Image (spheres, rainbow, N blue to C red):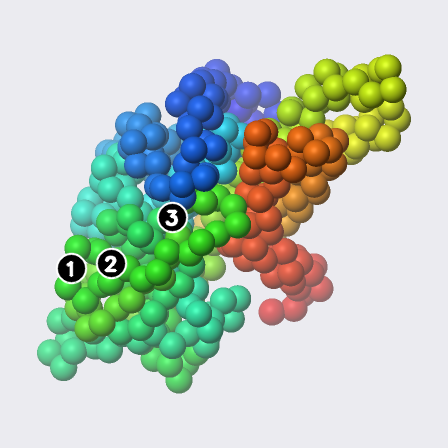
Amino acid sequence: MAIDVATGMNLTLSDEHEMIRQAARKFAQERIAPIAAEFDESGEFPMETVREMGQMGFMGIEVPEEYGGAGMDTIAYVLAVEEISKADASHGVIMSVNNSLFCNAILMFGTEEQKQKYMAPVARGEKIGAYSLTEPMSGSDAGTMRSRAVLSEDGTHYVINGLKSWVTSGPVADYIVLFTMTEPEKKHRGITAFLIDTSKPGFERGKKEPKLGIRASATSEIRFDGYKASVEDVLGEPGQGFKIAMAVLDAGRIGIAAQALGIAEAAYEASVQYAREREAFGAPIGSFQMIQQKIADMKTRIEASRLLIYNAALAKMRAKDTGGRYTVEAAMAKLFASETAMWVTTQAVQIHGGMGYSKELPIERYFRDAKITEIYEGTSEIQRLVIARNELGLR
């Protein structure tokens, strides 16, 4: 995108951005779209196509080339997530977690050794990354988490115990960015981030969640029972975990916003085609004003979402140079795009009538997949709190 990062005024795609969008679109439509319904039905993790996404550079788009990534920017990332998600939201969230929550966390806070050991193989698509903050009794309020990491007497390692929940890619992840309590009495300030190797003793995968949507994106509990994490596997500094988690979620929200945009676009394009072809009372249903109103509102909300996402991506790019934050821009993009995805897919089901409710068409899958975008990486309610508190000067 030919953009002045200081002002963000020119929204013309650069040749490089157009290239990655076309590459992602071609791969998504040729390799992912034909299998999306099958993997949604089975709930199986699409390992083959995920590995292929890694080979194409989609699993570490913003990671520098020396660490196995594509070395591109945030605009390239959101374009690729959007195109992948138009074909299948499950592939989109797997890609988003790998990029935004795992690789980005290590890129921002990791040591050189951690980048080489954990980030590089995930960016190349050889390994799968995950992010674990939520617990069964601790969602939006991270300060109440019950898992614990206790430093050994000789100071060489931490012993981790506890249960984490709703871990995207948990059933297949090789490495996980884990947030757990090291000083519970400090609540949020007592959380520490760790890099977890799931092949080590003391790590167990729990029950797989039977989800409404994004069913091919494996989600599960994970359990730690005497897991030993070396002090070298602490990400950032002890007690810095909540700060890291929130900074990383800013990037994650941009990825989920792009995923939501892709879902909405898929539902919209299918609705336009159906409105042109389906006839009732001797005319295409697209000639009826009520259908036209839905199409107009769907298109407008989609384009508004796109601009908010690009704005958040530009803010992230500026923050990379200035060291600032882009929390509000990410929250606005995620809030509006996710609610747009839910609204657009609801209208798409209505436009398709009975066929929208049938598994013969992907419309019902888009509808099911859209809902989670209003929940993970911070609910819509949390996004509104973030935005309002910033505007009111509250902390």
| For the residues bearing labels 3 and 2, Cβ distance under 8 angstroms | no
The numbered dot on residue 200 is: 1
Distance (Cα) linking label 2 and label 1: 8 Å
What's the amino acid at mark 1?
Lys
Image point (62%, 45%), residue name: 338
Whether 77 is drawn above or below 171: the answer is above
Q: Which residue is mark 3?
A: 218
Image point (69%, 26%), residue name: 271
Q: Is residue 284 visible?
A: yes
What's the amino acid at mark 3?
Ala
For label 1, the SS is: loop
For label 3, the SS is: loop
x, y percent for residue 379: 59, 58
| For the residues bearing labels 2 and 1, Cβ distance under 8 angstroms | yes
N-term mark: 3 or 2: 2
N-term mark: 3 or 1: 1
Along the viewing direction, whichever of 209 and 198 lies nearer the viewer: 209
Distance (Cα) linking label 3 and label 1: 21 Å
What's the amino acid at mark 2?
Ile
The numbered dot on residue 196 is: 2
- Judged from this view, the residue extending furthest toward the bottom is 185
